[in-house]
Image (tube, helix red, strand yellow):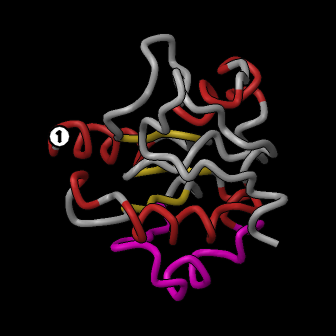
């Protein structure tokens, strides 16, 4: 997993990307787990990724506009939800929720969800065959975090 993190970081340091991530629950078609469970098109997610966060995986890179919408880099750091938050030279913002992917569960996951909720698409993710799978909070960010 560290090589994936290093690869994303090297790329994000050179290219202003609007969404990038390292996780273990994305889809094979490019969709994030959030997009999949909300029934959203990954193409639409890509097109809107300057303003709408496609998910909140363990390591995430988002656009400067999304970071501003969430209160800026300082606010993200002060939230205590992330192990690491950094504004990159490209303007994109990098965050890592926990030291290890395996630790990104429970309260760590919920803390990130609460902080990024204002930038998430609305809707309650659907369980998969009656089970809540992936690294998601199965709540509507608009309704359940007000």
Quadrant of the drawing holding the C terminus: bottom right
The residue most toward the left is: 2
The image quarter containing residue 73 is bottom right
Residue 89 to residue 114: above or below: above
Other residues around mark 1 within 10 Å, as few (<14) / some (14–19) / many (≥20): few
Foreground residue among 125 and 50: 125
Foreground residue among 145 and 93: 145
Decide whether residue 74 is among the magenta residues: yes
Relative to residue 140, is residue 105 drawn left or right? Answer: left
Quadrant of the drawing holding the N terminus: top left
Decide whether residue 114 is among the magenta residues: no
Residue 30 in the image: state x and y as whole percent.
51, 18
Q: Where does label 1 land, which residue? A: 1
Foreground residue among 31 and 127: 127
The residue most toward the bottom is: 78
Residue 38 in the image: state x and y as whole percent.
70, 30
The image quarter containing residue 68 is bottom right
Residue 37 to residue 79: above or below: above
The structure residue drawn at horizontal position 51% and vertical position 65%, both measured from the top left corner, is: 110
The image quarter containing residue 35 is top right
Residue range in magenta is 68-88
Foreground residue among 64 and 40: 40
Residue 13 in the image: state x and y as whole percent.
40, 50
The structure residue drawn at horizontal position 42% and vertical position 70%, both measured from the top left corner, is: 107
The structure residue drawn at horizontal position 51% and vertical position 47%, both measured from the top left corner, is: 136
Relative to residue 130, is residue 134 drawn left or right? Answer: left
The residue most toward the front is: 130
Residue 87 in the image: state x and y as whole percent.
50, 67
Relative to residue 36, is residue 24 drawn left or right? Answer: left
- Total labels: the figure holds 1
The local secondary structure at tag 1 comes to loop
The structure residue drawn at horizontal position 52% and vertical position 88%, both measured from the top left corner, is: 78
């Amino acid at each position: 997993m560290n090589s994936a993190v290093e690869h994303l970081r090297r790329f994000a340091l050179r290219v202003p990307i609007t969404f990038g991530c390292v996780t273990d629950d994305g889809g094979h078609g490019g969709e994030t787990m959030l997009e999949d469970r909300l029934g959203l098109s990954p193409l639409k997610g890509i097109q809107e990724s300057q303003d709408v966060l496609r998910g909140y995986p363990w390591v995430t890179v988002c656009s400067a506009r999304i970071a501003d919408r969430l209160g800026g880099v300082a606010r993200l750091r002060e939230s205590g939800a992330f192990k690491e938050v950094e504004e990159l030279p490209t303007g994109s913002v990098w965050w890592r929720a926990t030291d290890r992917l395996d630790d990104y569960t429970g309260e760590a996951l919920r803390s990130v969800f609460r902080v990024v909720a204002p930038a998430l698409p609305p809707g309650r993710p659907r369980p998969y065959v009656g089970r809540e799978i992936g690294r998601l909070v199965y709540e509507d960010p608009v309704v359940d975090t007000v």
